[in-house]
Image: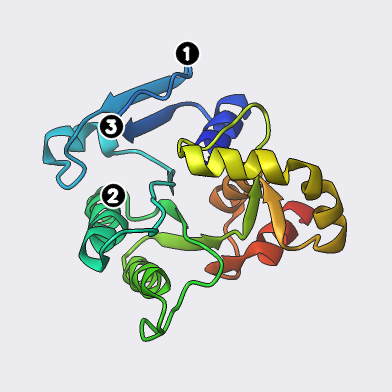
Amino acid sequence: MVGQGVLRECLQAADVECVLTIGRTPTGAGDPKLREIVRDNLLNYADVAGELTGLDACFFCLGVSSAGMKEEDYFHVTYDLTLAAANTLSKLNPEMAFIYVSGAGTDSSEMGASMWARVKGKTENALLRLPFHAYMFRPGLIEPMDGIQSKMRLYRILYLIMKPLLTPLRWALPNQILSTREIGQAMLAVARFGCRSRVLEAKDIRDVLRG
């Protein structure tokens, strides 16, 4: 959902000249400034390195739920695929902003009891050591907007059930709920201007929007 949200904001932003997406399936968004690379291999980018130069920012939104997954499988998707892209991009564009969508509750110590939080923490720490401007976004509850839906059927059902509760929850917990539109706009703002903090919780993401 976050990927769809930031793609929408990039395509609408007047100062974004072109958008390159990489994934296993097409985005379905038709736009003159959109270029898409559809590929199965997300571990090696040597064959498309020429297309990955001259970029100002990367919004890395790939991710899966850890529910029902073995740690090694979750580690492969969360850590291996992220670092494969990040290592390539940091060499080709050392001044770029790399914004990684992590999650609330991520364990920076890499030592906690929660498997997904440890793996996310290890991924964040590895990204922060690379020679580009890396920022970790840790949103909590995400409200889909602009017709955006999760690709996971279970999540779509949960959001449908929760929809009537989102307005009162926003009022009660204003710093814990962010919309896909808000996250996308905040990611663009950090890419444009940077941010003092390199790890942004939901409240910090909202503060970016407030300027």
Determine which residue is flagged by label 3.
24
- Residue type, label 3: Arg
Locate the C terminus by quadrant: bottom right
- Residue type, label 2: Leu
Determine which residue is flagged by label 1.
32
Determine which residue is flagged by label 2.
89
CA gap between label 2 and label 1 equals: 24 Å
Q: Secondary structure at mark 2?
A: helix
| Horizontal side, residue 133 vs residue 196: left or right | left
Determine crowd level at label 3: few under 14, some 14-19, many 20+ residues with C-alpha closer than 10 A.
Answer: few
CA gap between label 2 and label 3 equals: 18 Å
Are dots 1 and 3 in contact, CB under 8 Å? no
Determine crowd level at label 2: few under 14, some 14-19, many 20+ residues with C-alpha closer than 10 A.
Answer: many
Towards the viewer: 16 or 136: 136
| Horizontal side, residue 144 vs residue 132: left or right | right
Residue 68 vertical position relative to residue 161 in the rendered view, above or below: below
The residue shown at (77%, 48%) is 166
Are dots 2 and 3 in contact, CB under 8 Å? no
CA gap between label 1 and label 3 equals: 21 Å
